[in-house]
Amino acid sequence: MKKIPVIIFVLAAVLMAACSSDEQFRVSGTVEGNPTMNMRAGYYADGVYKTVITAVREGKFEFTGIAPQPTVLELMDYDYHPLVRLYVKNGDTYDVRMNVQDIYDVDISGNSECSRWSAFLRNNAEKLRKDANNTIAAYIDAHRDDIVSTLLLMTSFDASEAAEEADSLMSLIAPEARPSSVTEAYMYVLDRLVSEAAMSPVLPMKYIDSKDSLQSFNPSRQGMTLISVSRQSDYRRDSIVPALRRLSKEHNSKKLAIIDFSLDNDTAAWKRAARADSATWKQGWAAGGLASMPLKALGLPSVPYAVVCDSAGVQLLRTRSVGQAEAFINAQLK
């Protein structure tokens, strides 16, 4: 049998590598301080949300993914705290330098969008920390044909408290700079924020409590209500639960009702955590997440989230910060 020249094997390997590189993207990078840790990557592609878990060893990491259409990839720590975002598509290789202590201290190469995006974050870090919304609005007004405007609006602009402004800013951006493949999920949430449902009075609702009993809530039974929605990973133990505990001690149930909804998929884990909270306030589980029957009408944009309403169900405050909700309630009920 004739031997096949080695050069053929080499050529075949090169061709296979070239083919595969066009059908995936590659991300490699370094983390300041050279830590060893696990990291998550999440992105939408082909109509589904995909996740990758990668290991950072002495500050180095590398992974691949598949994105036939350009999409936003988010790097997170293992507890889902966002670290870095990239604009990725198949065929590209990205190099990331990042700092887990400072999300604005980032440098990304691989395409012009990532380079300009990360440069803006680095160069405007202090402005973004002080007033991200106005800083981003100014950039969008001056760069209406730039997809970086879309990326900044989607990822760094706080639309939870400025939904109508976010909607107006998106309309300023040229259609070619806000492709639907990138903005579809964001626009779905934004539409919910500016919809009538988000501004409508909070209606009576039913929910399942930690004892698997059906409970009912009616805003008219107390002067004010705080509805808090979170998961166990959303700083509950450090910030959310302490705030709810302080409010429940400060204000009696006739003045303030608190309903603490969990979106955790694991109901057994939620029940254990609920018992550990020693809560004197109402706790409920929302099967189906933000689309569940108790929460769907509120049009919540993200988790964690808090809504404060009066006895008529009128929404007085919508915020991602339970601390802000606590300060607002204390000021109103003092």
Image (cartoon, grey):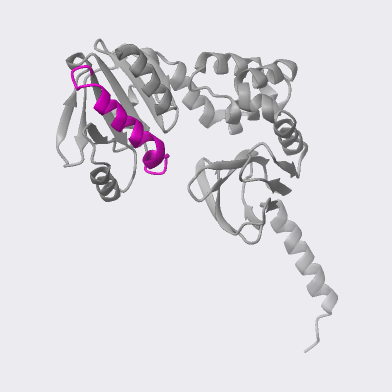
Give percent across and percent down for residue 207: 21, 31
| Residue in front for this viewpoint, 138 or 281 | 281
Residue occupying image coordinates x 16% and y 30%: 215
52 on left or right of 211: right
> In the rendered structure, which segment of residues is drawn in magenta?
232-255
Res. 201 visible in picture: no
248 on left or right of 264: left
| Residue in front for this viewpoint, 253 or 292 | 253
Residue occupying image coordinates x 27% and y 20%: 225
Classified by dominant secondary structure, the portion drawn in magenta counts as helix
Say which quarter of the image contains residue 202: top left
Give percent across and percent down for residue 30: 70, 53
Res. 181 visible in picture: yes
Residue occupying image coordinates x 42% and y 39%: 234
- Which part of the image, by quadrant, shows the C terminus? top left
153 on left or right of 268: right
Q: Is residue 247 magenta?
A: yes
Give percent across and percent down for residue 148: 70, 29
